[in-house]
Image: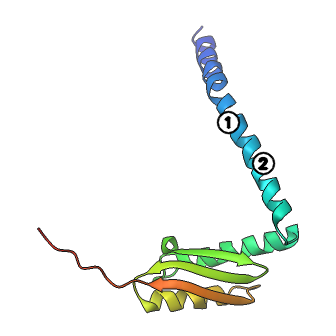
Amino acid sequence: MKKRASFLVAWLAACLVLPGCVPVLIGGAAAGGYYLGKDDRDPTQIAADSSITAKIKSRFIGDKYVDAFDINVDTHNGEVTLYGDVTNTIAREQAAKLAAEVEGVKSVDNQIRVLKPVKTTES
């Protein structure tokens, strides 16, 4: 009896929760299809660019100078654009160096800004 009650509760929860996922899944697939239809790259190049971006972000995560959360990476036909904000030029230069070393990268456009430290006043 206890198993049956647990099954009914799980089934009821699934019926209430999962219908909300269907529009998200359909909408996400439609948006992805639209994006692919508007992209000038073929699927092989899109996959290669995604792989380059992932490799660069992985290198950022393992680096002591670069905070991967501060820098965004876009790759289009092997051309990488880095943008975001860092607190020093070492991080900016290191990010560009790490990106350029990834196989498949044709060029790196370093748009990373170095922010001046903000002084805070203590109350």
Q: Is residue 65 visible?
A: no
Q: Position of residue 77 (x, y in %)?
A: 79, 80
Amino acid carrying label 2: it is Ala
Residue 116 in the image: above or below residue 74 = below
The mark nearer the N terminus, 2 or 1, is: 1
* Crowd class of label 1 (few under 14; some 14 to 19; many from 20; radius 10 Å): few
Question: Could you tell me if residue 37 is visible in this image?
Answer: yes
Residue 37 to residue 100: above or below: above
Residue located beneath label 1 in the image: 21
Q: Residue at x 64, y 87 (%)?
A: 109
Q: How far across and down, in percent of the image, does residue 39 sit?
A: 82, 67
- Residue sitting at the far left: 123
Q: Residues within 10 Å of mark 2 (few under 14, many from 20)?
A: few
Apparent side of residue 86 relative to residue 16 in the rendered image (left or right): left
Would residue 34 be found to the left or right of residue 8 on screen?
Answer: right
Q: SS at mark 1?
A: helix
Provide the residue designation for mark 2.
29
Q: Residue at x 64, y 81 (%)?
A: 81
Query: Residue 111, position in %: x, y?
Result: 56, 84
Asked if the residue at tag 1 contacts the one at tag 2, i.e. Cβ–Cβ closer than 8 Å, the answer is no
Q: Is residue 95 above or below residue 121?
A: below
Q: Is residue 115 above or below residue 21?
A: below
Q: Quadrant of residue 86?
A: bottom left
Q: Nearer the viewer, residue 31 or 60?
A: 31
Secondary element at tag 2: helix
**Residue that sits furthest to the front in the current view:** 38
Indicate the quadrant where residue 1 lies. top right
Q: Residue at x 84, y 74 (%)?
A: 45
Amino acid under label 1? Answer: Cys
Q: CA distance from mark 2 to mark 1?
A: 12 Å
